[in-house]
Image (cartoon, helix red, strand yellow):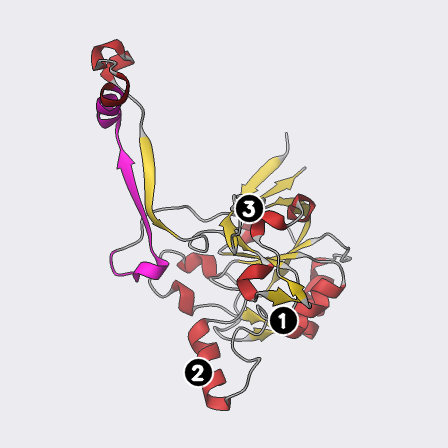
Amino acid sequence: MPRVVDLSAPIVASPPELPEALRTDIEFQGHAAGAQQIEQLLGVQPELLRDGEGWATERFTNFGTHNSTHVDAPWHYNSRVNGERAQTIDELPLEWFTGPGVVLDFDGRPDGEVIDVPDVESALTEAGHDLQPGDIVLVRTGRDAYLNELDYMARGCGVSAAATHWLFERGVHVMGIDAWGWDAPLHLQAARANDEQEQGIFWAAHQADLPYCQIERLCNLAALPPTGFIVCCFPLKIVGGSAAPTRAVAIMA
């Protein structure tokens, strides 16, 4: 049997201090409440159910499409990409979301540092991987260690627009990172963009004008070899969505 490594962050309720826009809130209904619901909806008494129990269910009361391990669609970046209307998550080919994977290891790089083309080339050489069209490139920063910390989104290095173009030009349509975002932390980008008053600094890799996908908030990349595995990261089919949660996994023979 192949070994499967889970690359997805657990979906849990957020701590109360987290701002609403970033929160995940879940309501859990137990078996006793489920039995009451069955009685109310269908008239079946609890004594007619095994152990008097009904169904257990859960309900998201706050769960953004970007608030878990997710795949970003081009629509997230801009309304038009490469001169055409950007694709939403349900419009992308499923073939993009499974393929040979490679881990580019940048663990230990400081927060805010930008990963550029020479860094990617060097990491591919270290991984011993000959990049091919359809490969899924995973960037390891080690910031999944801070997944449950309130400052998680403020941590991590980011990938440059030039490096994103370089990967895309070699046939990579899906690339991912084990940090909050593909670009450097937002507050660091914002400070530089405001200081320099120049377009193309804030969200540079997102708005690189490319029809590509990012997997953000990955986990457990340290459990993978540099290469020799298959990534599966199919997003939920949310019609018109800018992104969708995914259960990203790596499959190793």
Q: Which residue is mark 1?
A: 208
Write down the region rendered in magenta. Answer: 16-38
Identity of the amino acid at label 1?
A: Ala
Q: Is residue 59 above or below residue 144?
A: above
User: Could you say where residue 123 lies in the image, as x and y percent from the top left?
Assistant: 67, 65
> Residue 145's image quarter?
bottom left
Q: Secondary structure at mark 1?
A: loop
In primary-sequence order, the first of circles 1 and 3 is 1
- Residue lying furthest top in this view? 48
Q: Which mark is residue 235?
A: 3
Q: Which residue is mark 2?
A: 191
Identity of the amino acid at label 3?
A: Pro
- Residue lying furthest front in this view? 85
Q: Secondary structure at mark 2?
A: helix
Q: Residues within 10 Å of mark 3 (few under 14, many from 20)?
A: many
Q: Is residue 207 above or below residue 52?
A: below
In primary-sequence order, the first of circles 2 and 3 is 2
Quadrant containing the N terminus in the rendered view: top right
Q: Is residue 76 above or below residue 117?
A: above
Would residue 212 be found to the left or right of residue 203 on screen? right
